[in-house]
Image (cartoon, rainbow, N blue to C red):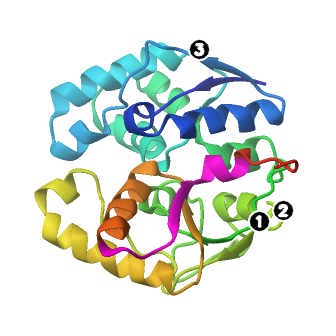
Amino acid sequence: MDVALFIPCYVDQLAPSVGIATVEVLERVGCRVRYDPGQTCCGQPFVTAGEWSQARRLARRYLDRFAGADAVVCPSASCVATVRRRYAELSLGDTRVVKEVGARTYELSEFLVRVLNRPDVGARFPYRVALLQSCHGLRELHLGHPSEAVEIEDSAPGPTEAVLRAVRDLELVLPDPPDECCGFGGLFSVQFPEISTRIGRSRLVALAATGASHVTSTDASCLFHLEGLGRRAAFGPRPIHLAEILAWSEER
């Protein structure tokens, strides 16, 4: 399958290893990966800030770059949620194109499970890992089951948990409570740093209580936030992106 790779700007600038790992995983399951160097930000920060003109400019660029792709895969649940859910609110013109491109844009674990039906990618990661559920992934992409849901029709693990449970020698643990926000929230952490820090510390304590050596998520931004708090407090599991875990092979 031909796959267009969309790399978030913060991954490109701060965590290129996540992008490289995503390519390795996709190629391992037989995909032909195409990367367009002309791509840029999906516009999420501008959407959050209410800067509609800038958000539209970046959204149109995304649609132009990826309109012809059979599938777009991105190692960021929040960026995918922006394309799939927020673009429809920006009055971008051709609503058909907006819907079609959004429907073909996938978070990595979502693509592996729901499109390829390949939760097992041949990875091995012999560590105890705590899962930090991304708020966007959990509640906008339905990559898991939020604890506040009154009725859950499907009790099977969501895509993120499914791919982790398929990794050889990985012991998956969930914090208590299992799906509270890490406190980052993009511009929220800039505008309300004290609140963001308190939420993050609470999440860090819960993650450390699991005894996990690592914490993983579908969003590098959430992991950056926890990594900074953990360094200052000198405790907590080591952050590692989901794609980096899946890129570990049986031979390592």
Residue drawn at x 87%, y 48% is: 251
User: What residue is rendered at 74% in x and 57% in y?
Assistant: 163
Q: Nearer the viewer, residue 135 or 99?
A: 135
Q: Amino acid at mark 3?
A: Gly
For marks 1 and 3, give the CA distance.
39 Å
Left or right, 81 with reference to 55:
right
Callout 2 environment at 10 Å: few (<14), some (14 to 19), or many (20+)? Answer: some
Q: Residue 122 colored magenta?
A: no
Q: Position of residue 45 (x, y in %)?
A: 25, 40
Amino acid type, callout 1: Pro
Q: Which of the two labelled residues, at mark 3 and mark 2, occupies the earlier sequence position?
A: 3
Closer-to-camera residue (240/134): 240
Residue receiving disc 2: 168
Part of the protein shown in magenta: 233-246
Total count of labels = 3
Element carrying mark 2: loop
Residue 164 lies, with reference to residue 69, above or below; the image says: below
Between 248 and 242, the one nearer to me in the picture: 248
Nearer to us of marks 1 and 2 is 1
- Name the secondary structure under disc 1: loop
Look at discs 3 and 2 and give the one toward the viewer.
2
Q: Amino acid at mark 2?
A: Arg
From the top left corner, tell me how far across and down residue 134 is, in percent.
47, 61
Q: Which residue is mark 3?
A: 68
Task: Please name the residue shown 24% across and 77% down the image.
Answer: 198
State the residue position of label 1. 126
User: Can you see residue 186?
Assistant: yes
In the rendered structure, are the residues bearing label 1 and label 2 in contact, judged by CB atoms less than 8 Å apart?
Answer: yes
Marks 1 and 3, the one that precedes in the sequence: 3
The earlier-in-sequence mark between 1 and 2 is 1
